[in-house]
Amino acid sequence: DSGVTQTPKHLITATGQRVTLRCSPRSGDLSVYWYQQSLDQGLQFLIQYYNGEERAKGNILERFSAQQFPDLHSELNLSSLELGDSALYFCASSEASGGLAEQYFGPGTRLTVT
Amino acid sequence: AQSVTQPDIHITVSEGASLELRCNYSYGATPYLFWYVQSPGQGLQLLLKYFSGDTLVQGIKGFEAEFKRSQSSFNLRKPSVHWSDAAEYFCAAHNNNDMRFGAGTRLTVKP
């Protein structure tokens, strides 16, 4: 158990809909990262927040957005969903920011868009 | 473009045999390098990482990796594989707030 929790575990929704994925980092970790894992694209970094501020952006679509709240939990919002958005979405957390920080991954949220 | 390549999609080894998983990176400067393992239905777990210094890095679960600058490689090794090592292994590189992963190598362990 990494100490990172993600809810829900599974989500099934229809195209065009909007969903919110939630992540609670390990106690004391200030950084939260979001990743998407799909058969087509593999594992891709989406976005990172550090202590409430956006720190780095990867291959995140404009239809997707994220935020980190004062209690350090984070939410990833996916809107106008397409079939291709079906994937496993991971959250990771680390104590610090930057490449030196070890990231601890949550179990993921499996999103199915029908 | 920056990239991480894992040439082997799937590897099968017998229990007790040695293992080497290949990873090559393409970056202007040497990035931070990582190996992660993902068991079915689980998130990723860090096995080891390389930032600088000794090019042979020891990790958890008996894994090690060797950084070779001349070959832009960071191959993962284990002298004797256990059935519980069956999983997907990802090589990753981090540079300038950009983390990239290889496509992964699925390891099957034969009894």
Image (tube, coloured by chain):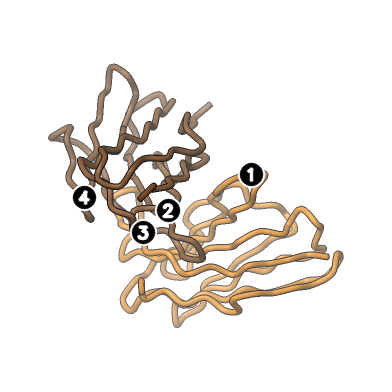
User: Is label 3 in a helix, a strand or a loop?
Assistant: strand
Question: In terms of sequence position, does the residue under pointer 3 or pointer 4 come before the other?
Answer: 3
User: Is label 4 in a helix, a strand or a loop?
Assistant: loop
How many discs appear?
Answer: 4
Q: Position of residue A35 (x, y in %)?
A: 54, 57
* Residue linked to disc 3: B45
Disc 1 and disc 4: Cα gap in Å? 28 Å
Disc 3 and disc 1: Cα gap in Å? 20 Å
Q: Which chain is brown?
A: B
The nearer-to-camera label among 2 and 1 is 2
Foreground residue among A9 and A25: A9
Task: Return the chain for callout 4.
Answer: B
Per the rendering, the colour in which chain A appears is orange
Decide: few, some or many residues near mark 4? Use Cα within 10 Å; few <14, some 14-19, many ≥20. Answer: some
Foreground residue among B53 and B58: B58
Residue drawn at x 23%, y 32% as measured from the top left: B66
The nearer-to-camera label among 3 and 2 is 2
* Residue linked to disc 1: A41
Name of the residue lying farthest toward the front: B111
For residue B84, which quarter of the picture?
bottom left
- Let me know if marks 3 and 1 both belong to one chain: no
Q: Position of residue A47 (x, y in %)?
A: 54, 56
* Residue linked to disc 4: B59
* Residue linked to disc 2: B87
Question: In terms of sequence position, does the residue under pointer 2 or pointer 4 come before the other?
Answer: 4
- Let me know if marks 3 and 4 both belong to one chain: yes
Q: Amino acid at mark 4?
A: Gly
Report the side of B95 relative to B77 (left or right).
Answer: right
Question: In terms of sequence position, does the residue under pointer 3 or pointer 2 come before the other?
Answer: 3
Q: Position of residue B106 (x, y in %)?
A: 47, 45
Q: Amino acid at mark 1?
A: Gln
Q: Which mark is residue B90?
A: none
